[in-house]
Amino acid sequence: AALQESHSLHDSRFQEIQEQSAHHSSLAERVEYLETAMGESADQHARELVALRDAHGRHSNSLQDLQERHASHSSLVERVEHLEKTTGESAHQHARELAELKDALSRHDSSLQDIKERHASHSSLVERLEYIEKSIGESADQHE
């Protein structure tokens, strides 16, 4: 009986060891699965990290392009403002010069009118010469 009890205990212990072994095998498979999943996940994360770095580089370049365009755009605004200011000043200067020319023309027109009036009141050169010749001729006739 002691032998049988020893065999029974041995069988019971053997069965426990087999169950533990089955469990250990299952545990090894589970660890292997986790390692594989982690490896795939790490590979996927590495690929995604590379893709994110590439996207960041493209966005950085795009941002730099936009900043450069914005800088030249500001320069363009300044240039247009300068042209508007210059054109405005030029227009005011031309308006002043035009007013001065109109004033000068008006003065010359007045002077011309005065000259015409004085000329009209004076005898013409031909009339004056004829008068002198007539006076000299009458005077010569009287002296003869």
Image: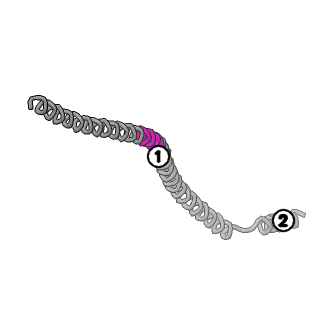
**Residue range (magenta):** 46-60
Residue 83, position in %: x, y? 52, 50
Residue occupying the point 28% across, 40% down: 26
In the picture shown, does residue 125 fall above or below 88? Answer: below
Taking 17 as reference, is 33 left or right? Answer: right
Taking 70 as reference, is 111 left or right? Answer: right
In the picture shown, does residue 33 fall above or below 114? Answer: above
Residue 7, position in %: x, y? 16, 32
Q: Looking at numbered disc 2 in the image, what kind of residue is underneath it? A: Glu
Label 2 element class = helix
Instruction: Report the residue marked by disc 1.
Output: 66
- Disc 2 from disc 1: Cα separation: 96 Å
Q: Nearer the viewer, residue 105 or 22?
A: 22
Taking 115 as reference, is 97 left or right? Answer: left
Residue 121 visible somewhere in the drawing: yes
Q: Looking at numbered disc 1 in the image, what kind of residue is underneath it? A: Leu
Instruction: Report the residue marked by disc 2.
Output: 133
Residue 101, position in %: x, y? 57, 58
Residue 67 visible somewhere in the drawing: no
In the image, which is nearer the foreground, mark 2 or mark 1? 1
Label drawn at residue 127:
none
